[in-house]
Amino acid sequence: MPAEPSRPGPKPPRQAKREAASRRLLEEGLRLMARRGVQACRVEEITAAAGVGKGTFFNHFASKEAFVAHLVDMVLTDLARRVRPLGLAPQDGESLLAGVGTVHLRYFQLRPEAASLLSQACALERDSEPGRQIGQRLAAHLDLVASMLAPALGPLDWPQDHGRELALAILSLSCGFFWFGRPLGLGPESPAALLDRLGRLTAQGLAPRSG
Amino acid sequence: MPAEPSRPGPKPPRQAKREAASRRLLEEGLRLMARRGVQACRVEEITAAAGVGKGTFFNHFASKEAFVAHLVDMVLTDLARRVRPLGLAPQDGESLLAGVGTVHLRYFQLRPEAASLLSQACALERDSEPGRQIGQRLAAHLDLVASMLAPALGPLDWPQDHGRELALAILSLSCGFFWFGRPLGLGPESPAALLDRLGRLTAQGLAPRSG
Amino acid sequence: MPAEPSRPGPKPPRQAKREAASRRLLEEGLRLMARRGVQACRVEEITAAAGVGKGTFFNHFASKEAFVAHLVDMVLTDLARRVRPLGLAPQDGESLLAGVGTVHLRYFQLRPEAASLLSQACALERDSEPGRQIGQRLAAHLDLVASMLAPALGPLDWPQDHGRELALAILSLSCGFFWFGRPLGLGPESPAALLDRLGRLTAQGLAPRSG
Amino acid sequence: MPAEPSRPGPKPPRQAKREAASRRLLEEGLRLMARRGVQACRVEEITAAAGVGKGTFFNHFASKEAFVAHLVDMVLTDLARRVRPLGLAPQDGESLLAGVGTVHLRYFQLRPEAASLLSQACALERDSEPGRQIGQRLAAHLDLVASMLAPALGPLDWPQDHGRELALAILSLSCGFFWFGRPLGLGPESPAALLDRLGRLTAQGLAPRSG
DNA sequence: CATGAATGAGTTTTCATTCAT
DNA sequence: TATGAATGAAAACTCATTCAT
């Protein structure tokens, strides 16, 4: 057994190189699949962009579909990293909801590839293993958001057992805005103020009217 | 002079049969492409379901992509038929916006195939002619909705020249809800009351708080 | 029975119209098949150019291949009409051979479509009936030319039973010149004097050297 | 340092196998396309004959048309290899011309597939890239032959700037003889003496009559 | 007869995946 | 483990031919 296998320090170069290849594949894959379409983007394009041989792709990922599932996981994990902190500081329900909505919207504004990928990933057949994984990963994200929003549901008079639907509405609005907006050039050109208002839309739309 | 050549009456049977085949192709195509995915759905599946030969498909539509563009047009025309009446009766801005949102949401709830199709159609390459048509058709729909919402923008303090973004938000929320919700089984199972609240979300979210 | 069925006079208009359509199909077919290639040229292109419906084509010709066979016959009959008169006036063998060569060359110079058609028609499968007909028609033309050249063979010391080969050489040179020359732009641009010399080539090449 | 990395010696077996497959594809392709017709011959027939999978064909050649262009290049290169030596030894013009004609004629007699291929290749659409290549390759061959014949043109009183036409006449006669002769069974059955006389035809046909 | 809509066999080409090196 | 050549299932699309009107 090599020395210090658990110390995070400098990894054995073999392992480091392998991980770097994996990272490059995922990065370039996300970029290309978003730009050219998940189906239209060929595996060889991705490996060429990542600077590795075509066969290497299948040493790292079981199939193209599994690769997409991996990307979905990556994107949602990345998104969750921005959303989760909002649950740490105690806030009133409306602010929490507004924060979650705004973070989602800003995330997809900065990363339109993520919106493109998620929208297309849903089209993968449900009867393949990676397809199921994508659905489950999406559900997990909605569950996470729903659990964060749980404290806000009561005051907003939203049924506790339908938090997922609220999370789904937030995801749909934010992700769809850049997916459907892409052919129109909307999204990148929309003023930040507008997008922020849209981010708070859910919160204010559900808030009780004081009038 | 032949009798009443302009009366629509019984069409020549040739023409009628042809139109019926076209209609069946579009109906079955929408259903199958939504269920199995636009790309995964083979042309032959559609023609088999429509009860015509494979070649007939290409007598009616120049390509599979052109067929999808036709479907998008059909769906958006259908949707517009439900939305347009809302602009006829004078209402306050908030009611108008709520109506438009609710109609969109209900439309996609009743026709999840429509949500599925629109979401997938955006993935078609932008550099093909049918791909461009899809983008333009989508823009036309947003323009229609934006023009209907125009009277509501002022009171809601939404910039007049960004009506499209508001329409885009409504479309994204309603269409995306059933697209992203599909793998989770959400949508058909969500209580109608929830969906109605989501339909009014945009209206209430933008309305000035009276407090 | 209608009156005067055998008098050549004004034909019944039905018949006349039918023959006109046939003629237009053959004319346009020859033009288009020469320009775009026999295989690449679709039946519908021909009927469109001839101003008749697609189905009419198959009322006049059993198949596309049979149509090509008909064109070959037409072209070779036309060519024979120019060649045959040379056999009527008594001439010395060399002059006869030169005349036949020159007529062939001039024919294909004026009608490059004919050269194109004949060259391509040889590619039709030999195991179809029209394919066999094409071969036989070509053989018949060579036999005609050979029989005309027969009196010239003796003086030129060319074996009497290989007249076909001589005819074949004349056809190859004249037809091939415009077929292989087409991609190069040769043929139409070649000075008439050169072509005339080539037309006499066979005659002079076989003539006994007086030196 | 590895031993002699530059010595051509035994190639890496990977590369050698690949080249062998390419060679087999070209050989079998030439044979089959000549026999059954360029268009009628399916790619799968060629790969089956060459003992490789269907996909391999497209790893080696961009398209069926590109494959034909490659074959044309191969055939003309092969033909040029026989013709070129004639230009090295100084001869009088007539002998040179006779040599070139005879070599062409014998080449196509021994390789009727070559005549078949060249004749059919000219039918490929001019507006595709491989189609253009074929035309250019043919022009290059005629230029080569024309340049070889250049010294002979003066004595034969043939204009220096129309050497191409002379080369074209030689090619047409020799190649066309076996192309048009194929359906008739001429060519392989023609006595060698006749063919030799035809090979010298151009030379003697242009030579000044000493009488 | 003329027409043109319907038909489906046939063909090229693509591309994810495998596997020998 | 990386590579890229080989593979063949799959799918869109073509187009000659048929036939009901």
Image (cartoon, coloured by chain):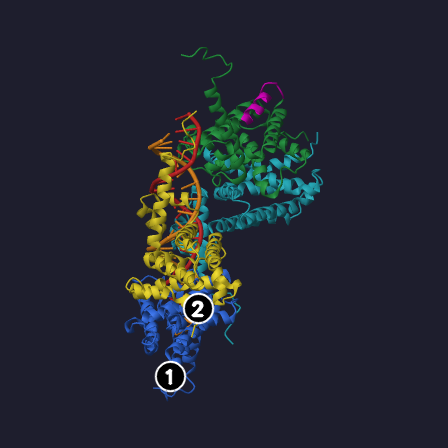
Chain colours: A green, B cyan, C blue, D yellow, E orange, F red
B60 vs B74, nearest the viewer: B60
**Is D30 included in the stretch rendered in magenta?**
no
Q: What is the secondary structure assignment of the residue under circle 2?
A: loop
Q: What is the secondary structure assignment of the residue under circle 1?
A: loop
Q: What's the chain of the residue with tag 1?
A: C
- Count neighbours of disc 1 (C-alpha within 10 A) and say few if under 14, some if 14 to 19, many if 20 or more: few
Q: Is residue A159 visible?
A: yes
Residue D198 image position (x, y, % from top left): 36, 66
Q: Which quarter of the picture shows residue A97? A: top right
| C163 left or right of A54 in image | left
Residue C120 image position (x, y, % from top left): 40, 63
Residue corresponding to mark 1: C90
A119 vs C72, nearest the viewer: C72
B141 vs D130, nearest the viewer: D130
Quick check: D56 above or below A2?
below
Q: What's the chain of the residue with tag 2?
A: D
| F7 left or right of A79 in image | left
A47 vs D65, nearest the viewer: D65
Q: Amino acid at mark 2?
A: Ala
Quick check: D128 above or below C115?
above
Q: Which mark is residue D207?
A: 2
Q: Amino acid at mark 1?
A: Pro
Q: Which mark is residue C174?
A: none
Quote the CA–CA distance across marks 1 and 2: 26 Å
Residue D90 image position (x, y, % from top left): 44, 57
| B166 left or right of D210 in image | right
Mark 1 vs mark 2: give the one in front: 2
Q: Which quarter of the picture shows residue C161? A: bottom left
Residue A18 image position (x, y, % from top left): 46, 24
Magenta residues span A78-91
